[in-house]
Image (cartoon, grey):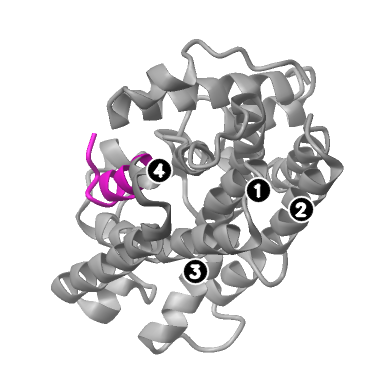
Amino acid sequence: MQMVQLKLNPQTLKNSSFSQRLQTVAEHVERALDQTLPLPTSRLHEAMRYSVLGGGKRFRSYLIWASSQIFNAPAQEVFKVAAAIELIHSYSLVHDDLPCMDDADMRRNKPSCHKAFGESTAVLVGDALIPLAFQILLSLETSSEIRVELAKKLSEVVGSFGLVAGQMMDLGQEGSRLTLEELTEQQCLKTGVLFGYSMEAGAILGKASQQEQKILQAAGILFGKSFQMIDDWLDEYGDEDKIGKPCRQDTEKLTFLSLLGPRRLYKEAELFLDEALQNLSPFQEKADILREALQCSFYRVK
């Protein structure tokens, strides 16, 4: 894999505003993804690039970078791991959009993968993105212990106790979802675990202690819960042009909005955000950039 060249040194990046840092990190990750994905010499590879490149805020990538700053992890490796996370996130979106899943025609302001390339190609795109993410992790220029730990943790996030389990529950094929606790568990698996991994990965790269890694993972999962609650609100009341996908897709599904109503939803979401921020207190001012990221994302600050 080619090296990802930095345009800004870490201190300059830290001194920028949140929106500037988010954009800069996204540019580095986009470059890493472009260098990692196969050239579009086949329909499959063209569809992979279509589904991954040129879209999304790369906020999960930003969380990796922000958490890594607490431990001064090497930026080159951080952006590679961020690229791996974006491949996994893209796989989940491609499969989530399929007619047999959520049946969404638009993603990131363009036709979803199955609308542009067909359902069978979309299935294979998701299948191909997963091993590519692990190839990135296992080719990192760091210790074998760190490479194995990152790959092991990601396999748990992706598998039948993580993203796949959450999707199964979302389809209504794995038990009922009648209570707030049950819906929270489902969305934690679909959304929260990847946020948790993103924040934990920065700590792993920075050679943090096991306790520090667990603190960041827990904070990420808590934030993921608040993030999904606000996402449910946006599905009903958001602007499609800003969100990049059709709104009111979940009107027939049990969501935090339909279960709690808008006022209680917002209150519960803020409680999860506050708890996530409290988890970061052991890191004091070193976690200020990460705290800012969680708050700005929650309140959708640009």
Q: Residue at x 75, y 16 (%)?
A: 2
Q: CA distance from mark 3 to mark 1?
A: 21 Å
Q: Which residue is mark 4?
A: 286
Please report the residue visible at 55 percent of the width from the left and 34 percent of the height from the top.
72
Is the Cβ of the residue at disc 2 closer than 8 Å to that at disc 1? yes
Which of 250/25 is in front? 25
Q: Is residue 54 above or below residue 266?
A: above
Earlier along the polypeptide chain: callout 1 or callout 4?
1
CA–CA distance between discs 3 and 4? 27 Å
Q: Which of the marked residues, 4 or 2, is nearer the chain's N terminus?
A: 2
Residue in the image at 51% along x and 74% along y: 186
Query: Which three-letter amino acid code belongs to the residue tagged 2?
Result: Glu
Q: Which residue is mark 3?
A: 188
The earlier-in-sequence mark between 2 and 3 is 2
The stretch in magenta equals 289-302
User: Tag 4, which secondary structure?
Assistant: helix
Q: Measured from the top left, where is residue 263 in percent x and y?
A: 14, 72
Of residue 135 and residue 276, the one placed in the foreground of this image is: 276
* Residue 259, quarter of the rendered image: bottom left
Q: Amino acid at mark 1?
A: Ile
In the rendered view, would you say 237 is above or below 260? above
Say whether disc 2 or disc 1 marks the residue closer to the N-terminus. Answer: 2
At horizontal 31% and vertical 62% (from top left) the residue drawn is 273
- Label 3 or label 1, whichever lies nearer to me, is 1
Q: Which residue is mark 2?
A: 149
The answer to if 20 sits in the magenta stretch is: no
Q: Which mark is residue 204?
A: 1
Q: Is residue 127 above or below residue 22?
A: below
Outermost residue to the right: 144
Residue type at tag 4: Lys
